[in-house]
């Protein structure tokens, strides 16, 4: 008979090892990796894996004094999971140790691996006073170095502190955000998003089934607000999936085309359009080669990027990636900006954004785009809003960081530029 609580732990270790050994992202793994678990077990497995990744740096510091040499990832991840259960969840030591030993025996590792897990977790359980004295988990070296060069060490330490806290749940209302905030028990933010600190199961919140709102980080909701689409305008969401910005644009009454290269991700956009009762034309195609029937009044380009601004919600990213894809992303972003400019009507508006902390994917891209296109200029009027804080502004647009709004839960890292094509 299976021991209670073992199934989600087993699944969490599998997820962790897929991330650390295979370089896979949780977003790729979750749809199928947990399908045999009950809903509450799925939620726990995902939470265990996410928390372990978020606190992995500190967990490794706890484990270090008790390991003569680092074991293989499959063993190390059982140990990391146990540390996080003990130190973050305050779980009973005997249950954590027993589960770790059982997982080792199940995986047909050597007896010594089970013995190692047993001995090390028992020692950690007696040393938990050390946990809060350890440094906030640091970013992986491949990312921390470039970010310190761009922002300075002090700012990166504040960003790391924001990552460690995780993220609340933000909603975007189709209409009447005040009403949605009241119904869900959330707080209406200055930007118009609704924030819930302890949301629980999303699908059970008031207004989900009726499509009154959708989940979208507050920072991610800003680009569409700045585009300010109007009824009757032809608008392109150039890299649409998962669809939050498409829904925002459609809610304005504009005629919206949602374009994305992934058929599977576009199916999710169509699903969300159906739930919310909003209308957009969904097109599966490559934005670098796709040819529209006519030019657009406005385009929103949330370009493919490193996603380094979303680590507070996706702590697997620094462990699944190593920065080797950066140069390819930079080139793709440049191509997409050029395609967007070509698809704009004279006088048309372009919002370029990336959920990245890297200036090469934001400020640098816009500076170079302005030098390539003589008829392209910054649209400063688009940023004329009272809710935009001065700390967010930079020379080419808005630079949002996870440590902003730290007292109420932070926000994703984003770069946003408002551009206009000469009439």
Image (cartoon, helix red, strand yellow):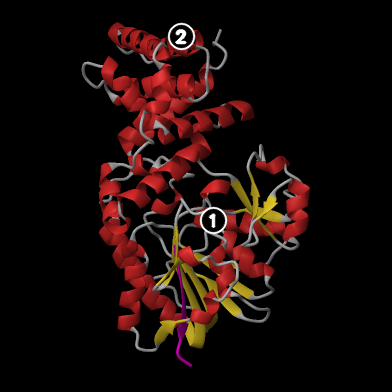
* Residue annotated with mark 1: 242
Crowding near the residue tagged with mark 1, few <14, some 14–19, many ≥20 C-alpha atoms within 10 Å: some
Residue 87 x, y percent position in the rendering: 46, 22
Residue 91 x, y percent position in the rendering: 52, 17
Between 156 and 16, the one nearer to me in the picture: 156
User: What is the span of residues highlighted in magenta in the rendered image?
Assistant: 415-423
Q: Is residue 91 above or below residue 413?
A: above
Q: Residue 20: name its quadrant.
A: top left
Helix, strand or loop at label 1? It is: loop
Relative placement, left or right, of 163 versus 183 is: left
Q: Residue 81: name its quadrant.
A: top left
Helix, strand or loop at label 2? It is: helix
Residue 223 x, y percent position in the rendering: 53, 67
Circle nearer the N terminus (1, 2): 2
* Residue annotated with mark 2: 98
Crowding near the residue tagged with mark 2, few <14, some 14–19, many ≥20 C-alpha atoms within 10 Å: some
What residue is drawn where x is 57% and y is 56%?
218
What residue is drawn where x is 34% and y is 58%?
358
Q: Is residue 420 magenta?
A: yes
Is there any visible trace of residue 150 in the rendered image? yes
Q: Main secondary structure of the magenta part?
A: strand
- Residue farthest toward the left in the current orientation of the protein: 69
Single out the mark in the foreground, 1 or 2: 2
Is there any visible trace of residue 293 in the rendered image? no
Q: Which mark is residue 201?
A: none
Q: Is residue 197 above or below residue 251?
A: above
What residue is drawn where x is 38% and y is 58%?
305
Q: Is residue 94 above or below residue 294?
A: above
Pointer 1 with pointer 2, Cβ within 8 A = no
Q: Residue 252: name its quadrant.
A: bottom right
State the separation of the CA atoms marked 1 and 2: 40 Å
- Residue farthest toward the bottom in the current orientation of the protein: 423
């Amino acid at each position: 008979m299976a021991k209670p609580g073992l199934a989600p732990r087993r699944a969490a270790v599998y997820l962790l090892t897929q991330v650390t050994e295979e370089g896979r992202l949780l977003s790729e793994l979750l749809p199928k990796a947990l399908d045999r678990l009950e809903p509450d077990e799925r939620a726990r497995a995902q939470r265990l894996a996410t928390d372990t990744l978020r606190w992995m740096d500190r967990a490794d510091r706890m484990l270090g004094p008790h390991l003569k040499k680092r074991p293989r990832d499959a063993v190390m991840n059982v140990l990391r999971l146990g540390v996080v259960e003990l130190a973050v969840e305050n779980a009973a030591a005997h249950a954590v140790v027993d589960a770790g030993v059982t997982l080792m025996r199940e995986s047909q590792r050597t007896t010594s691996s089970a013995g190692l897990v047993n001995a090390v977790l028992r020692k950690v359980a007696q040393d938990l006073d050390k946990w809060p004295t350890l440094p906030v988990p640091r970013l992986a070296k491949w990312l921390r170095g470039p970010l310190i060069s761009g922002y300075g060490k002090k700012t990166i330490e504040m960003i790391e502190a924001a990552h460690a806290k995780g993220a609340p749940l933000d909603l975007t209302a189709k209409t009447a955000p005040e009403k949605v905030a009241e119904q869900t028990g959330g707080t209406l933010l200055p930007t118009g998003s609704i924030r819930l600190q302890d949301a629980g199961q999303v699908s059970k919140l008031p207004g989900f089934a009726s499509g009154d709102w959708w989940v979208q980080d507050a920072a991610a909701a800003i680009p569409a607000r700045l585009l300010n689409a109007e009824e009757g305008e032809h608008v392109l969401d150039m890299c649409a999936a998962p669809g939050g910005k498409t829904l925002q644009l459609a809610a304005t009454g504009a005629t919206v085309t949602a374009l994305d290269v992934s058929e599977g991700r576009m199916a999710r956009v169509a699903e969300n359009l159906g739930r919310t009762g909003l209308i957009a034309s969904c097109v599966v195609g490559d934005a670098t080669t796709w040819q529209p029937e006519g030019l657009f009044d406005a385009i929103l380009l949330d370009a493919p990027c490193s996603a380094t601004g979303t680590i507070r919600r996706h702590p697997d990213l620094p462990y699944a990636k190593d920065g080797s894809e950066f140069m390819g992303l930079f080139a793709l972003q440049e191509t997409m900006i050029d395609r967007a400019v070509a698809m704009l009507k004279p006088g048309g508006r372009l919002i370029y954004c990336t959920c990245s902390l890297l200036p090469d994917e934001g400020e640098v891209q816009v500076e170079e785009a302005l030098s390539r296109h003589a008829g392209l200029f910054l649209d400063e009027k688009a940023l004329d809003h009272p809710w935009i804080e001065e700390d967010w502004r930079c020379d080419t647009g808005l630079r949002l960081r996870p440590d902003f709004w730290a007292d109420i839960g932070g926000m994703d890292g984003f770069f946003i530029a408002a551009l206009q094509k000469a009439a």
